[in-house]
Amino acid sequence: MADFDQQKNFDQNKKTYNEFWKWFSGHAQDFYEVIKSGQNVEENFINIFAPELDKIESQVFFLVGMEEDKKAELIFTPDGRIQNVFWAEKLVAEAPEIDNWKFRALKPASQNIDFAIKMHDLTFDRENIQFYPIIHENYPDKIDLMFVYNAYHEEAHDDILNGIFIFLDNFLGEETMIQSIDKINVKGPQNVIEELIPLEKLKDYIIWREKEFVEKYQDVRHDPSNDEFTGFEGTVEGDKPILSTFNTSILNWEYKASHPWILVIMIHYTPEGEAGFPDAETYKVITAFEDDLELTLPSLSGYIFLGSETVDGLRETFIACREFRLATEAIHNLQVKYKDKLDMNYEFYKDKYWQSFERYNMD
């Protein structure tokens, strides 16, 4: 019955996509003429299209423009939210063939090596940006890159870093930025002692690092049969008590980087009493949900139950994942299944060495 319900939920979502694309097909030629002309695009395309997209995927954004082959290209982007990659890709997978249109999920890498981004009265291009890797002895698979920007000045650090990020999003493509790079930062050329690498070599560097990573971890799976969980008690700001249960037996696992995506499931509840914990009935539903969760995302398929924290009306459950696309769909289906019982949302973030849980390491 559970499998049937999940498929039913997915089919309902698919029907919504079909309705959206049917609507778009009816306007496609008019939209094409607007994009082709470049006139009144906001009024005659964006202001019409955006509300319709919002009805089915409110967290998916879009870009539109003309390609060299005279076709209009519509790109759906998660705009940095990992959990929305799946929905952008699913939306494009359901798109029909429409004359004069191309549809793409995630921003592609630029094919023009000389392209530039202008922001905050600054220009970002391959001529004024170089880089070097920051090597971490304890985190050897972490791709941490320092970019050196010729026109850097400290008071504009955040604006410059944002400009670098947007430039790289287009230079490398959104898929590479999401999947491959763990951290970036920026500084000026003054007092740099490291050997600087030209930006045009960045793609090859990332491919090399990614190849090493895949070869090292592609067959790694965790056997949960010997997992041991430890309970912790403490307080947070405002002297609110916090209860945590964590899989302390795995926090020193040598293959943590094979499961770099952390899924956080957040359940909001009305606390029973001043301590901030849920009542017995809510605990019962949360336990049933977490049992479902472990069945839906088993360790041998690439998911590891790390633990949970309960404090002041919030239960957070943490899963380390090899990937995030299938996990997104699975959690969405569970969210639908429990929609009348639990107030739940979720997100993914990248933490290749589970550094956000080092406080629970008992060694």
Image (spheres, helix red, strand yellow):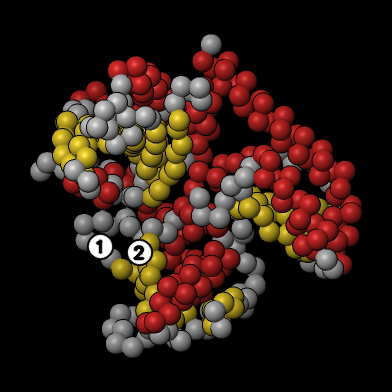
Q: Quadrant of residue 277?
A: top left
Q: Which residue is mark 1?
A: 136
SS label for mark 2: strand
| Along the line of sight, the residue nearer the viewer: 103 or 219 | 103
Instruction: Residue 158: tell me if it is visible.
Output: yes
Q: CA distance from mark 2 to mark 1?
A: 8 Å
Q: Please give the name of the residue rendered at 63% of the width and 53% of the height, measured from the top-left corner.
A: 61
Query: Which labelled disc corresponds to residue 144?
Result: 2
| Along the line of sight, the residue nearer the viewer: 320 or 221 | 320
Left or right: where does residue 36 sit relative to residue 178? Answer: right
Q: Please give the name of the residue rendered at 39% of the width and 44% of the height, measured from the top-left corner.
A: 261
Q: Earlier in the sequence, mark 2 or mark 1?
A: 1
Three-letter amino acid code of the residue under disc 1: His
Q: Residue 356 placed where, x, y %?
A: 27, 49
Q: Please give the name of the residue rendered at 37% of the width and 82% of the height, measured from the top-left corner.
A: 154
Q: Quadrant of residue 150?
A: bottom left
Q: Please give the name of the residue rendered at 50% of the width and 50% of the height, measured from the top-left corner.
A: 81
